Image (tube, rainbow, N blue to C red):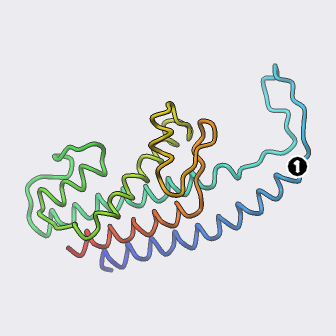
Amino acid sequence: MKLTAQIDSDCKCMKNYFTNLLKLLNESREAEALSPTELYDLDADESQSKYHGFSHFIKPDMVINIYSLVDYWMTSICEYHRKSRQLSLKITDIKGHGDLDARHKYLTKYANINLDGVKDSYKHLGQLRKIRNKFIHGGGHINSDKEDREFSKINGITISGTLIIIEESFIWSKLYHAQKYLLAAVKA
């Protein structure tokens, strides 16, 4: 199977998975809204809750899944071009501001692949990476007013106190741009 077909299949599978996750999100929110309010012993060592909701994990998980898809395929695409163009450097030989940047540099600077047509998609992947990193390394919380201003500018992201809130539009947009960028990188 061609790389383009594999990427297309993975993205379509993820769309289907996300559609089902969003249904589950709505169901879990309804159940959470019906759960009784409880009082807690703030000095207890274990949760005393009778109900444990999970809706707050769903969208961050989607962000992490999209970035994992990008991370995997970027490595595979770089390796594909290394072999097909008989390039001597490996992707680990190119440094950048994170793996996404290093792989993009490998493709554009070293393999001389023109990705100008997907610059906007690459920008979206950078935003995805920032949000993903905040969930992986910071529990989805921002640490400063500067980050608040920076993250609030991203379409589909809002800040509540210090917590990043992901809107459904962010998920679909980033999956679309991931697929667009990855397919362009293979076809170049």
14 sits left or right of 19 in the view = left
- Total numbered circles: 1
Which corner quadrant holds the C terminus?
bottom left
Which corner quadrant holds the N terminus?
bottom left
Picture coordinates of residue 31 (x, y %)? 83, 56
Q: Which residue is mark 1?
A: 35
Q: Residue drawn at (56%, 41%), measured in percent from left and top?
A: 140
121 sits left or right of 52 in the view = left
159 sits left or right of 136 in the view = right
Q: Is residue 122 above or below residue 153?
A: below
Q: Relative to the observer, which residue lies in front, 49 or 124?
A: 124
Q: Residue drawn at (21%, 47%), measured in percent from left and top?
A: 92
Q: Is residue 97 above or below residue 8?
A: above
Picture coordinates of residue 51 (x, y %)? 84, 45
Q: Relative to the observer, which residue lies in front, 134 or 3?
A: 134
Picture coordinates of residue 25 (x, y %)? 70, 60
Query: Which residue type carries mark 1?
Result: Ser
**Res 6 → quadrant:** bottom left
Q: Residue drawn at (70%, 53%), measured in percent from left and top?
A: 55
The residue sitting at the top extreme is: 43
Instruction: Tell me the SS state at disc 1.
Output: loop
Crowding at dot 1, Cα within 10 Å, few <14 / some 14-19 / many 20+, comes out as few
Q: Residue drawn at (30%, 60%), measured in percent from left and top?
A: 74
